[in-house]
Image (spheres, rainbow, N blue to C red):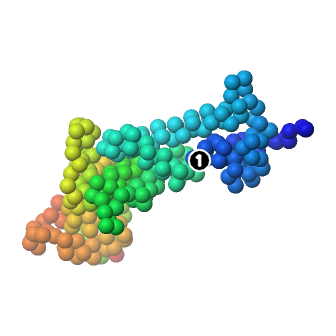
């Protein structure tokens, strides 16, 4: 009996569906994605792929499947190097295999491969009386931080756009500040963590023996300037202030909400506000001021 003939494009789509299935080639043949292209069973693979002198068709395809997943694993190690160093290579690889089974790659670009990794860790983390353990919370925080770096590095920036300088900031009449709004650069990210992960991240890259810190709320701004991703530690008041600004609230409303989290007196808060805005303008957080 003559084997069916399939055009090249159909075979390519079928092979992609089969070798990229996390459950293996035999299971991949049975998936709906593969069946939509070529409706055969695992026992019939040789209708499409010839055997070689040493390997049957299934084993030949498993070579490609293994190389495909090895490449994905290599990519994830590169995207989350500090997370891997923290949990250890073996456990990290187990996490990634489970992740790829739950969130298989759907994009033509490996740049999106790790976008759900922190979510997966949260969904599968060990729990103590229903609560995620402190160790797991820390690892999730670390994965979130590393992925944010990747997003900011690859995402839109404002390198070619004019930014609001400290000098321009000083020129805004004081009476107009309460109703003014500040447009921020597209690369700015504000993050809140259950642990001081930014300090750990810096220390871990210098010393592999750095211990995991105790839980302590931390706040961070991440941005990109001159194509370099930069981190800025924030206190709670700074975090709330910037969050309100990013959300499009007026400077006056943002300051009022941030004041609820400021621990010193009002006069010191006013002085600190000036320093904060000058620093953030110098770091190019803002594109422009929008006056009423």
The quarter of the image holding the C terminus is bottom left
Quarter of the image where the N terminus is located? top right
Total residue callouts:
1
Q: Nearer the viewer, residue 158 or 15?
A: 15
Residue 97 shows up from this direction: yes
Residue lying furthest top: 53
Q: Residue at x 56, y 34 (%)?
A: 67
Q: Which percent across, then down, holds residue 211?
A: 21, 45
Q: Is residue 213 above or below residue 203?
A: below
Q: Is residue 165 above or below residue 210?
A: below
Left or right: residue 206 versus residue 263 is right
Q: Answer whether residue 158 is visible to the viewer in this image.
A: no
At 31% from the left and 67% from the top, the residue drawn is: 129
The structure residue drawn at horizontal position 72% and vertical position 44%, both measured from the top left corner, is: 42
**Percent x, y of residue 57:** 71, 34
In the depicted view, which residue is nearer to us: 166 or 30? 30
Residue 195 on image: x %, y %? 25, 57
Left or right of residue 32: residue 141: left
Residue 233 point in image, percent of width and height: 23, 55
Mark 1 lies on residue: 23
């Amino acid at each position: 009996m003559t084997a069916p003939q399939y055009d090249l494009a159909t075979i390519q789509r079928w092979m992609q569906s089969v070798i990229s299935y996390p459950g293996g080639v035999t299971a991949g043949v049975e998936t709906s994605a593969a069946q939509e292209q070529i409706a055969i069973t695992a026992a019939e693979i040789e209708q499409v792929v010839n055997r070689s002198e040493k390997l049957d068709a299934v084993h030949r395809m498993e070579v490609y499947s293994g190389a495909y997943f090895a490449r994905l694993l290599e990519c994830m190690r590169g995207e989350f190097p500090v997370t891997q160093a923290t949990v250890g290579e073996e456990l990290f690889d187990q996490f990634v295999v489970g992740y790829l089974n739950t969130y298989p790659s759907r994009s033509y670009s490996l740049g999106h491969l790790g976008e759900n990794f922190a979510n997966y860790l949260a969904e599968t983390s060990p729990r103590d009386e229903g609560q995620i353990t402190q160790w797991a919370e820390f690892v999730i925080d670390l994965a979130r931080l590393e992925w944010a770096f990747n997003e900011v590095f690859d995402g839109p920036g404002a390198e070619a756009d004019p930014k609001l300088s400290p000098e321009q900031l000083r020129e805004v009449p004081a009476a107009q500040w309460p109703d003014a709004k500040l447009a921020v650069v597209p690369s700015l990210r504000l993050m809140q963590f259950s642990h001081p992960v930014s300090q750990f991240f810096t220390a871990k890259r210098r010393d592999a023996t750095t211990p995991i810190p105790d839980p302590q709320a931390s706040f961070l701004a991440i941005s990109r300037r001159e194509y370099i991703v930069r981190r800025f530690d924030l206190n709670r008041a700074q975090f709330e202030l910037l969050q309100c600004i990013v959300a499009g609230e007026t400077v006056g409303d943002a300051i009022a909400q941030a004041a609820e989290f400021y621990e010193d007196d009002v006069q010191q808060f006013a002085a600190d506000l000036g320093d904060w805005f000058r620093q953030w303008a110098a770091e190019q957080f803002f594109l422009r001021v929008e006056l009423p």
